[in-house]
Image: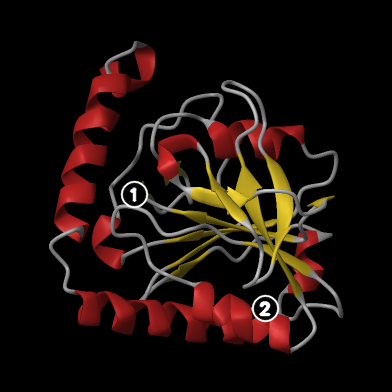
Amino acid sequence: MNTPLQQDTAWKPWRKAERERLIAERLTISGAARQEIGSRVCARLNTLLNLPAGAIVSFYWPFKGELNLRNWIVALLDRGFRAALPVVVEKGRPMLFRLWYPETRMERSIWNIPVPADTPVVTPDVVIAPLVGFDRARFRLGYGGGYFDRTLASFPEQPLTIGIGYSASELPTIFPQPHDIPMHLVVTESLVIGNDVPRPAHRLLR
């Protein structure tokens, strides 16, 4: 039987409250601890991924205590891979992805987050999404705008999707709704959740 949170709109204020709580908690983590957690997550990603030459990895610009993956992304660039950042072009519409390099000219977008100003639009092979919260079914609690779900639903062929966050942000459930799309993998400093990645995304894993 469905719970009240699944039957009506009670999940909306619940998610809002959990989102605020989890963000406040992670903002109390020291910079040094956050860097250590990020290093452990990146080590897990190196173990998991088996990228083909020239693969495009979309990451995110860290915001409100999110783990910073930029050094890992630069290391990928040095190995011949490509990187991209998501860009919100219109409220309520899917995001697009623009190539990113350390020298890329940036501009401010939604929530004042920097995004590439004028690099080419690309289709990523891997989409790394930040997690405010998550559950064991790999559903992602984000910031409430629905941008990642809307964007993933628009792909004719799904890229490999990886949610990145803190182990402490795990929830028993996010009370997923029909519009929610689970990640293929959730990766934290102490967890990797997901062993049923479908093809063609599976080809990007070891």
Residue under numbered circle 2: 49
Q: What is the CA distance from the residue labelled 2 to the residue labelled 1?
A: 23 Å
The spot of residue 181 in percent (x, y) is 58, 38
Residue kind at label 2, given as amino acid type: Leu
Q: Quadrant of the N terminus?
A: top left
Q: How many marks?
A: 2
The front one of 102 and 51 is 102
Q: Which mark is residue 133?
A: 1
The spot of residue 40 in percent (x, y) is 40, 84
The front one of 18 and 26 is 26
Q: Residue furthest top?
A: 8
Give the vertical position of 91 relative to 155 (above or below): above
The spot of residue 156 in percent (x, y) is 85, 39
Residue kind at label 1, given as amino acid type: Gly
Label 1's element?
A: strand
Label 1 environment density (alpha carbons within 10 Å; few <14, some 14–19, many ≥20): many
Report if residue 183 is visible in the image.
no
